[in-house]
Amino acid sequence: MSDIHRSNSAVIDDLVEAYNTGDARRFADFFAEEAVHGVLHSDQYLHGRDAIHARYVEVFAMHPQNRSDVVNRMAFGPFVLDHETVSRSPDSEPFEVVAIYTFEDGLIKRLDFVRT
């Protein structure tokens, strides 16, 4: 694995940690100022770091026990793809997502989700 792959993967490790601790500010700070975040092949997208931060403030308030666990990861070029299991609380039914992260200059430029 090249240095850039380790670097991008390390950013995603830190992003998942911020997600799992409910830290919306830290979570958003991994994104570029003009990042795009949403559901692949849909019109459900957030535009910009501030919008991402605002959305995750809401998500973490609604689901304070939110947790994501990485099942599998692939990294190549500017991309990191994670297969994750997400649960909203210990009693909730988990769901799976594939997160496709695109990097530029060490920050997430785009995040596309595929959810089952």
Image (cartoon, helix red, strand yellow):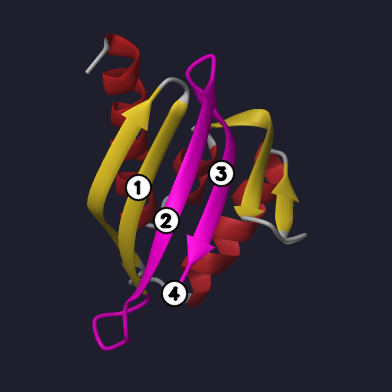
Gap in Å between the C-alphas at discs 2 and 4?
Answer: 20 Å
> Is 35 a magenta residue?
no
**Labels 3 and 2: the sequence-earlier one:** 2
State which tag comes first along the sequence, 1 or 2.
Answer: 1
Q: Is residue 10 above or below residue 104?
A: below
Disc 4 designates what residue?
63
Crowd around label 3: few <14 · some 14–19 · many ≥20 (10 Å): many
Q: Is residue 110 left or right of residue 51?
A: left
Does label 3 or label 4 sit earlier along the sequence?
A: 4
Label pair 3/2, CB-CB below 8 angstroms: no
- Residue type at numbered disc 1: Asp
Q: Earlier in the sequence, mark 4 or mark 1?
A: 4
Verify CB contact (< 8 Å) between mark 1 and mark 2: yes
Q: Nearer the viewer, residue 6 or 28?
A: 6
- How far apart are labels 3 and 4 at the CA level? 21 Å
Which residue is at 25% across, 53% downward?
70
- SS at badge 1: strand
Q: Which residue position is annotated with label 1?
A: 82
Front-lying residue, 41 or 47:
41
Marks 1/3: CA distance? 11 Å
Give the percent coordinates (x, y) of residue 77: 43, 20
Disc marking residue 98: 2
Q: Is residue 91 magenta?
A: yes
Residue density around tag 1, few if under 14, some if 14–19, many if 20 or more, within 10 Å: many
Q: Which mark is residue 90?
A: none
Q: Amino acid at mark 4?
A: His
